[in-house]
Amino acid sequence: MIKVMLYEDNPQLREGLTMLINGSDGFEVLAAFKNCENVIEEVEAYRPEVILMDIDMPVVNGIEGLKKIREVNADVKILMLTVFDDNKNVFQAISNGANGYILKKTPPARLLEYISEAQTGGAPMTASIATQVLKMFSAMNNEKGEDYNLSDREKQVLQLLVEGYSYKMIASEMYIAIDTVRSHIKKIYEKLHVNSKSEAVAKAFKDKIV
Amino acid sequence: MIKVMLYEDNPQLREGLTMLINGSDGFEVLAAFKNCENVIEEVEAYRPEVILMDIDMPVVNGIEGLKKIREVNADVKILMLTVFDDNKNVFQAISNGANGYILKKTPPARLLEYISEAQTGGAPMTASIATQVLKMFSAMNNEKGEDYNLSDREKQVLQLLVEGYSYKMIASEMYIAIDTVRSHIKKIYEKLHVNSKSEAVAKAFKDKIV
DNA sequence: TGATCTATAACATGATTATGTGGTTGACTA
DNA sequence: TAGTCAACCACATAATCATGTTATAGATCA
């Protein structure tokens, strides 16, 4: 028997979901509330396994509720429920430890599957949500700006600069004269359009050269 | 009619999948291959809408195949197929533009659904895969290490250092004496356990202080 | 009230960095 | 074959940085 708790401000939907879940074998709604005002006390009192959490609710919304719960309880599975796949909310929800993110238009049978999946440690999400997530994911890894086409040797010098090496240390590390290090660095500054070590280091990080 | 192409080294599974898909209304297998050796030519020739791509294949595996395809074609939907949800592969696949990632043990009916979802722009993935993705996602955003409890003023100085300001510039920017800037910076170095500007700047980025 | 912390500031010295100018070698290429 | 470029090296000078020591004023807190 999977113990479910419900947060949804729309009375019709709240009732509908409750009846659907209670009417299904293996599922049970412990309680349902219209917002997250007292979410901590409620979760502590009922100790559900899965929480269906609407995002748009008055007074205290679902994202706030999610944060509150996660401050005191890392185990309960929380499924965010929303009418549309808003980029910002998806990001917020995931960053704050939601276990899944599904659309309200999900058919009832599928909803029950999702609840089961969440309860057993899965992270159910509708395909459109998953698309958002994947896009954000690859955006975070591919935002490598220009290349600045540094030569291999220059990249190596920059790498060592980033690690805090002085010119002298770089010279001995690379078995070249300190003046050669200077030459390389001057070239690096030109290519990166900077004129100090700090800026070069900062740019190296920003543009993921290192 | 959704036009599908298959990459799978196991002959039985390849045959099985072909029959399943061809035997279903609205689906059609254009071709099936045992590895990605000539993937570019094959994709160009058949122009499928969805590709089912096994990850573990001899000679040229699925991740390599994915990369190759994405070099020349950004539109075709690619569903990665695997026997288990290996963290590294999931990351690789997603970073390289896969549209979904599903387990081979997925029941046939669900597999067809996934193909449809992919074709219409969704990103189908099994719940266990989604869990991996979410974990990686929040790991990327929460890995903010220590706080180093820099004071407000120190953070401000560090911020300006990162932007390439010299001590002199920082002093005039903050309306304080250059020696005060020095004091702050010395304190910053202590708190960050570094002993040069570059290291401080690097650490500011790594630990997301700025 | 005394201890602690932050922000401010000064002075001094040696190390490091930024910049300019100049050069050699070897590899690749139009 | 002349031109370009990466990698190497040298010398010089001014600016900047790292470090140490010392000190005052105000805020916070036990």
Image: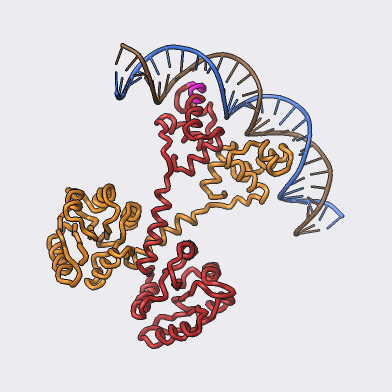
Chain colours: A orange, B red, C brown, D blue
Which quadrant would residue A179 be assigned to in this image?
top right
User: Looking at the picture, how far across and down is residue A55, in whole percent?
Assistant: 24, 56
Q: Is residue B168 left or right of residue A174?
A: left
Quadrant location of the N terminus of chain B in the rendered image:
bottom left
Q: Is residue A205 left or right of residue A92?
A: right
- Tell me, yes or no, if residue B146 can be seen here: yes
Provide the residue span drawn in magenta.
B177-181
Please determine whether, in this image, residue A79 is positioned above or below residue B161.
below
In terms of depth relative to the viewer, which is nearer, D1 or C17?
C17
Please determine whether, in this image, residue B187 is positioned above or below residue A135.
above
Does residue B178 belong to the magenta stretch? Answer: yes
Does residue A19 belong to the magenta stretch? Answer: no
Instruction: Kindly identify the residue that appears in the image at 48 percent across and 74 percent down.
Output: B53
User: Looking at the picture, how far across and down is residue A38, in whole percent?
Assistant: 17, 48
User: Looking at the picture, how far across and down is residue A85, in whole percent?
Assistant: 31, 61
In terms of depth relative to the viewer, which is nearer, B181 or A189?
B181
- Tell me, yes or no, if residue B77 can be seen here: no
Q: How many marks?
A: 0
Instruction: Kindly identify the residue that appears in the image at 54 percent across and 75 percent down.
Output: B57
The kind of secondary structure the magenta stretch mainly shows is helix
User: Looking at the picture, how far across and down is residue B83, in whole percent?
Assistant: 44, 73
Please determine whether, in this image, residue B195 is positioned above or below residue A50.
above
Instruction: Kindly identify the residue that appears in the image at 43 percent across and 70 percent down.
Output: B84
Which quadrant would residue A90 be assigned to in this image?
bottom left
Quadrant location of the C terminus of chain B in the rendered image:
top left
